[in-house]
Amino acid sequence: MTTTDCSACLEISGLNTYFFTGDGIIKAVRDLDLRVPAATTVALVGESGCGKSITALSVLRLVPEPGRVVAGEIMFNGEDLLKLPQLEMRRIRGNRIAMIFQDPMTALNPVLTIGAQIDEVLALHRALTGEQARQRGIAILEQVGIPRPAQRYDDYPHQLSGGMRQRVVIAMALACDPAVLIADEPTTALDVTIQAQIMALLAQQQRQRRMATILISHDLGVVAQNAAIVAIMYNGMIVEIAPVATIFAAAQHPYTRQLLDCIPKPGQRRQRLLQRSNDKHQTEQFSAPFAARGEHIPPMQQVADGHCVRRWS
Amino acid sequence: MVPLLQTEKLCKSFRVKNRYRSVGAALLPAVVDVDLTIARGRTLGLVGESGCGKSTLGKTIMGLLQPDSGRVTFDGTTISGLSARQMRPFRQQMQMVFQDPYASLNPRLTVFATLAEPFKIHTNLGAAAIADKVMELLDCVGLTAQHARRYPHEFSGGQRQRIGIARALALTPRLIIADEPVSALDLSIQAQIINLMQDLQQRFNLTYLFISHDLCVVEHLCDEIAVMYLGRIVEQAPVDDFFRQPLHPYGEMLLQALPLADPTIRQRNIARGEVPSALQPPAGCPFHPRCPYASAICAEQLPPLTAASAIRRVACHHAGQLNLDGITTAG
């Protein structure tokens, strides 16, 4: 967004990902532009189905059938990821660009020890095997705060608590020192005290490794505390993007404001009703300005340095 | 005035069978010595991390689970230990709203059939009268008559939760136990359901037991808060007092772990450790292994839940000496 920053580690421009279903085309991601500079956390925020996760999967070229990236370019290290051959992409996936998924129980293989799963990553991308891989694996487990990593290395996922499992998933993602980390709702499945621990761990690792991070979340609290830049998504589009302080203090898009008004904040008196409450047909109302204008999507307009908004009116 | 709901020394444990050995079923104490009181028309928020026994407590109060010991009193009548037949009149007066709006509605019944069922079971109204009642209910929760003929799969999560609430309201209950009713919903839908619950409370003078792990929602909706840890209530206080200054170190840990939706406030993060297994709860105070203020006595003696003031209770040996941080609120 800031034109002075040219060290963007990952740059997405004009991304369109559509799903070709029997009932018609679903435009999951529309005209998405996003720069993720090194050592910066960019948050993608929005409600379920707004296209956050599909954006992340598009970057990794893992969009499930019947979805397809129909246009756009994703520049990483001077290469367009969308044009790379499958084999090259495999070299990058999990190595230079890693992903942390929401549910650690489904992200881990229940019949393999956590050590074996970290080994797999190291064998594939670093050609480490045997004792070397084990030592490296234990070192990574220690870095992510797993107590007694040498013993834990031989444990199965079911022997660990939810928080520890998520630490293992993070260890796997960090095993090859990625340049870009995509964290898709990394703490949604966790309790609040564990969530705080995991987010602190991610922040610490991100600072140390200077990773470009995409944090996908619907929790504006997590975003406020962890992101530097926030992109608000609605209906497949980024409707507003700005530095975190600006989003929370001076949001311009009506959807961003409505989203912020929905958070029950500590200290807010209970008599003060939330703004989106009273309109019964809010969904219809809200999409009306989009529907009325059909397929036309207005371009992002810059309103301040690093602050862009899509305006329909 | 008699409180609407009261529990005394309520205990519930489960036998956990070892799948691979036939002997040695372990006892999991899910709810231990819980004393709670909810006054008419008030909302009590029950918070705690997963596995702390919140839902078990809710189900035990409802009579869906039989307590091992202790007593549940509803409007002055002891209801724990009643037979199913004796329980019937009370079931009309206490209803439950469940967390998962996808799993708690029968997929084979239309909304009309779901909402008509309570009337068929508990009243002798005729078909026309029931139809009127159902339409009235739909209107209460912001749905329309055309929704009545549809099946649950045709609705969004928020709409399904509205149906769940309508079903709970059908027989004009006095107490509603809501078990994480908004946890599965998106933020804006969450706000709608919270508002709906507030409106309905005023309109029908309902009393809520609101079970949640989300402190912000509890703060918004509840008058009082009870914090549970490993099956016990460790603190109970009016919501505002608790947020200003918790008395139990666990209360402080929960508040400090909250990610505040305000990038200008960076909070101190003191959460450490994880909840121990309820199968082997620590000796002494169950919280002492994670507590930054623990001393020798905490590892040995269980602190009782005692009155800290006329309106607050806390179970901590050091409650008097600690000066814990709440959340200073802006606006």
Image (cartoon, coloured by chain):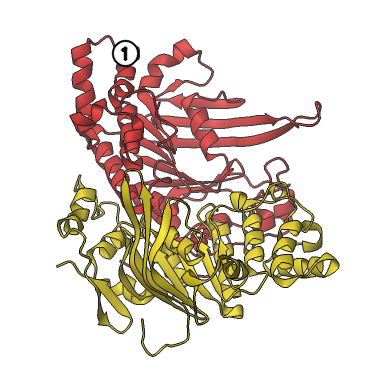
Chain colours: A yellow, B red
In the rendered image, the quadrant that contains the C terminus of chain A is bottom left
User: Residue, x 45% and y 49% (percent of image)?
Assistant: B237
Q: Amino acid at mark 1?
A: Lys
User: Residue, x 56% and y 65% (percent of image)?
Assistant: A86
Categorize mark 1 by other alpha carbons within 10 Å: few (<14), some (14-19), many (20+): some
Q: Which residue is mark 1?
A: B120
Name the chain letter of the residue that bears numbered label 1. Answer: B
Location of residue A185 with respect to A213 vertically, above or below: above
Answer whether residue B322 is visible to the viewer in this image: no
**In this orientation, which residue lies closer to the viewer: B305 or B230?**
B230
**In this orientation, which residue lies closer to the viewer: B119 or B151?**
B151
Q: In the rendered view, does B328 fall on the left or right side of B12?
A: left
Q: In the rendered view, does B164 fall on the left or right side of B284?
A: left
Location of residue A228 with respect to B289 vertically, above or below: below
Location of residue A135 with respect to B122 vertically, above or below: below
Q: Position of residue A122 (x, y in %)?
A: 72, 67
Q: Single out the residue that lies furthest toward the front.
A: A85
Q: Position of residue B221 (x, y in %)?
A: 35, 47
Which quadrant of the figure has residue B175? top left
Q: Position of residue B81 (x, y in %)?
A: 54, 18
Number of disc labels: 1
Q: Position of residue B300 (x, y in %)?
A: 74, 50
Which quadrant of the figure has residue A154? bottom right
User: Residue, x 37% and y 37% (percent of image)?
Assistant: B208
Q: Secondary structure at mark 1?
A: helix
Answer whether residue B137 is visible to the viewer in this image: yes
**In this orientation, which residue lies closer to the viewer: B331 or A291?**
A291
Q: Single out the residue that lies furthest toward the bottom.
A: A4
In the rendered image, the quadrant that contains the N terminus of chain A is bottom left
